[in-house]
Amino acid sequence: MKWTSWVTLTGLVLVISVVVYSSLRTGAIRCDVCVQFQGREACRSVDADTEEDARTGAITNACALVSSGVTDGMACNRAMPKHAECRVR
C-alpha cells in the first residue's frame, strides 16, 4: 500500500472514533419536562451536559409533538412547562 493510503485510513479511523464516542457519551444532567399546549400534553426526557441544554431540548421535543407549524412551535416553546424536573445522573 502507498503511504497516502495509510494516512487516509488513519484519518478515517480517527473520524469514525470521534463520531462513535460523541454518540455514545451521555450527558451529566437529565431533565423530564411535560408541556401542555392547545389541550394536548406531551412529556419528554433529555440528557445534556448543562441543565439549560437539557431543559431546552426536552421542551423542544415535547412541543414538537403537541404543536403544528412554526408559529405554534414557537408559541409552545415560550409557554411555561406544566412539569419540569432536572437532576444529576
Image (cartoon, rainbow, N blue to C red):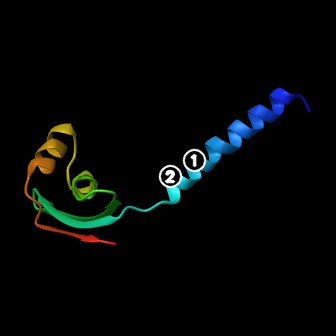
Q: Amino acid at mark 1?
A: Val
Residue lying at the far left in this picture: please name it.
Answer: 80
Drawn side of residue 11 relative to residue 32, left or right: right
Mark 1 lies on residue: 18
Residue located beneath label 2 in the image: 22
- Secondary structure beneath disc 1? helix
Q: Name the quadrant containing residue 70.
A: top left
Looking at the figure, which quarter contains the C terminus? bottom left
Q: In whole angstroms, how far apart are the C-alphas of marks 2 and 1?
A: 6 Å
User: Which of 73/29 is in front?
Assistant: 29
Mark 2 in CB contact with mark 1 (< 8 angstroms): yes
Residue 22 image position (x, y, % from top left): 50, 52
Give the residue drawn at x 33%, y 58%.
48
**Residue 77, above or below 39:** above
Image side of residue 72 versus residue 61, left or right: left
Q: Position of residue 21 (x, y in %)?
A: 55, 54
Classify residue 68 as left or right of residue 21.
left
Residue type at the position of mark 2:
Ser
Please tell me which residue is depicted at 15% across the width and 49% down the height of the picture: 77
Tag 2's secondary structure? helix
Viewer-closest of 52 and 84: 52
> Residue 17's x, y, as percent?
62, 49
Pick the quarter of the image with the N terminus.
top right
Query: Is 34 drawn above or below residue 13 in the view shown?
Result: below
Residue 7: image tag:
none
Residue 33 falls in which quadrant of the image? bottom left
Task: Identify the residue at horizontal 11%, vertical 45% (top origin).
Answer: 75
| Mark 1: few/some/many CA within 10 Å (<14, 14-19, 20+) | few
Q: How many marks?
A: 2
Crowding near the residue tagged with mark 2, few <14, some 14–19, many ≥20 C-alpha atoms within 10 Å? few
Percent x, y of residue 7: 76, 32
